[in-house]
Image (spheres, rainbow, N blue to C red):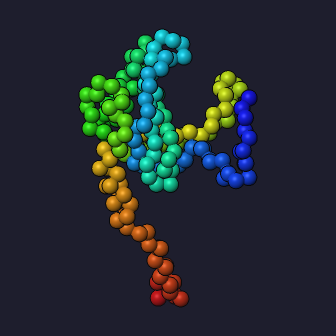
Amino acid sequence: MANLTGFDASTKGDMLDFDAFPECKALGMMVASQMKPTKDGTGQYLECEFSVLDGPHKGRRLWTRLNLVNKNKQAVDIAERELAAICKAVGKPRPSDSNELHSIPLLLDIGYEPAKAADPVKNKPARKAENYFKGYHPASAAAQVSAAATTAPVPQAPAAPAPRPSTPPWAK
C-alpha cells in the first residue's frame, strides 16, 4: 500500500507507447550492464541496456542478453561475437569491466520481429512484436547514414507513356 495523497491523474499526460518500432539505425549508447544467472542456474549472461539518443525513438530503451557463461558453446560464441561488435563500435577492444562500454555513443542497427500468435499444436505461447539488435557500428557511421539519407536521389514520378499512334505501325 502507498499513500497517493496529492497525486492528480487529470494533470498527467497519456501513458507512453512502448510497442516495438520499425527496423532502423539510430545513435544510442549503453547505459547499464549487469551479469545475471541463467534461469537454470548453470550459466551467466551479461544484460546490456541501451538508450536511443536521436530520431523518432529518442529515449527508448532496448536490452540484449549475452550468454557469456553457458554449457552451450555455440551460445557463448554468438554472445562473444556480439560483445566484440559492441567493444569495437565504442573503441574499447579490451575492456576489463562492462562499465567501460557505458556512455559512449554508437550506431545501433535495430531489427524488428513481428508478433506471433500462439501455436497450441507446437505448444508455443503467443509472443509480442519486439526489437532486437542486428549490429553495432562506430558513432561516425551515424553521420554517414544521415548524409546518405539526405543526399539520396528523390524518387521521380514515372514519365507519362507516349501517346499511342492512331494507326498501328503494321497497318501503314
Question: Residue 106 at x, y = what percent?
Answer: 35, 44
Instruction: Indicate left or right for 93 with 30 as reference.
Output: left
Between 71 and 64, the one lying in front of the other is: 64
- Expressed as whole percent of the image width and height from the top left, the position of residue 30 reads 40, 37
Residue 128 figure quarter: top right
- Give percent across and percent down for residue 110: 45, 43
Q: In percent of the image, x 74 and y 29: which residue is there? A: 1
Whether residue 149 sits left or right of residue 113 in the image: it is left
Tell me residue 118's x, y (percent): 68, 31
Where residue 70 sits, quadrant-wise, is top left
Looking at the picture, tell me which residue is in the foreground, 6 or 75.
Answer: 6
Q: Residue at x 37, y 40 (%)?
A: 103
Q: Who is closer to the viewer here, 165 or 34?
A: 34
**Image quarter of residue 35:** top left
Image position of 106 with respect to 11: above or below: above
How many marks are shown on the rendered structure?
A: 0
* Residue at 25% in and 28% down: 94
Foreground residue, 169 or 75? 75
Residue 12 appearing in the image = yes
- Residue ID at (51%, 84%): 164
- Is residue 137 shown to the viewer in this render? no
